[in-house]
Amino acid sequence: MNPFVITGNIPEKLFCDRRKESQRIIRGLSGGDNICLISQRRMGKSKLVKFCYDRPELSESCYTFYVDILHTSSLQEFSWQFGQAVFSQLVSQSRKMLDAFVRGLKSINAKFGFDPMTGLPTFSLELGDIVRPDYTLAEIFGCLEAADRTCIVTFDEFQQIGMYPEKNMEALLRSHIQHLSNVHFIFAGSERNMVSQMFQSSARPFYNSASILELLPISRTEYFPFVTGHFAEAGKSIATENVQKIYDLYEGNTYCMQKTFHEAFDAVPSGSECSLDILRQTVDSILEEAGSGYRLMLSGIPTRQKELLYAVASEVRAEKIMGADFIRRYSLASSSAVQTAAAKLRKMDLLTVRDGAYLIPDIMLRMYLQRISDPGKQFL
Ligand SMILES: Nc1ncnc2c1ncn2[C@@H]1O[C@H](COP(=O)(O)OP(=O)(O)O)[C@@H](O)[C@H]1O
Ligand SMILES: [Mg+2]
């Protein structure tokens, strides 16, 4: 079995570190706090939530719900996903609560049934069944508030609510949430600026309603022995120095590192060493594999924006992108064209600003673009 898990559930033994973070989350929730969990994409937020849910401190005394809203685009869909998630997760957690939930959802014509094969209740709820999403939302929260155990709800990819046509979404959710004492929340999100503004700006409804936990890369002192240890356990080896090269290449992005070691682990026969050369080949093949998706994405982007992406990728951290120097160096059209392009790219999350510099947050995309500008580029 490959110890570097990149899809599905991560067994506890193969879950690296996050002890402090999980303690903070569990302690916070147990004390009645809400948590706002933010990081770059693929740093490990969702897996960390799952990991916390599985700890006995939560699993033995709470009902836990996880709602991914990345693909939702309205309050109606939000309520739909939330209802679906609560139902499907109650099936395995509490029959009594499930019955109460079914009775409580009066605003919708959900088709509750019974599967004769499994003996479990079934629930068929179509998006179109939700005609008054605000009522439905109130009913779902009402049901959780009345539960015989504390309820923990995670809304993952929470930044998505900013894309809904309902402009009062934050205020609406906040008005529900502030009346709940039996339900605590994790709001997880990947667009740092947006999510932190939501919780840290005194003018916004969610101000001060959650404590913010920014998930940083797993530390080197935890990650290096994790990697070398798992290679060793399988009778393979890898030099710490090479683990470090991968860590630095990806700036500690959990997914990119795990993906690389997953592939490299398979490429190394038992009894052999995972050399720098194997790592190079692995990185190249991962980039190639990611390429088809990136090509498709790039084909839908106007030239002006693409030019800017290539320019920022080359610099890694690009400062003063609207300045004459930068524009000349990369033969860009004009300061105002760059400004417009940057705004569009930021909206799509292809570009972010960190500490005053522009960068491409998706490191693989950045590397892919660098390779196109400079086909001979070596990353390790
Ligand atoms: N603590 C961890 N130990 C091992 N692998 C992890 C850990 N956290 C995350 N991963 C890996 O990183 C990937 C991305 O994690 P995920 O939780 O989906 O990130 P996010 O929700 O921040 O985008 C996972 O698929 C998994 O392969
Ligand atoms: Mg996630």
Image: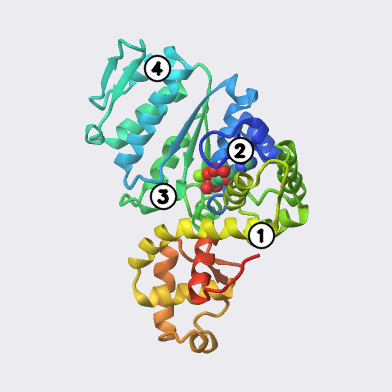
Looking at the image, tell me whether mark 2 or mark 3 is earlier in sequence order: 2
Q: Hey, what amino acid is under mark 1? A: Asp
Estimate the spatial distance between the alpha carbons at disc 3 and disc 1, rounded to whole Å. 41 Å
Residue assigned mark 3:
160
Q: What amino acid is found at the position of numbered circle 3 in the picture?
A: Gln
Of callouts 4 and 3, which one flags the residue occurring earlier in the amino acid sequence?
A: 4
Residue 277 shows which numbered tag?
Answer: 1
Which disc number belongs to residue 98?
Answer: 4
Sequence-wise, the earlier of marks 4 and 2 is 2
4 up-or-down from 326: above or below: above
**Disc 2 marks which residue?**
2
Q: Is residue 337 left or right of residue 249?
A: left
* In this picture, residue 379 sits left or right of residue 146: right
Could you tell me the amino acid type at mark 2?
Answer: Asn
Instruction: Name the quadrant of the C terminus.
Output: bottom right
Q: How far, Cα to Cα, is label 4 from label 3?
A: 28 Å
Task: Looking at the picture, tell me which residue is in the foreground, 270 or 48.
Answer: 270
* Circle nearer the N terminus (3, 1): 3
Spot occupied by residue 46 in the image (x, y as percentages of width and height): 53, 41
What kind of residue is marked 4? Leu
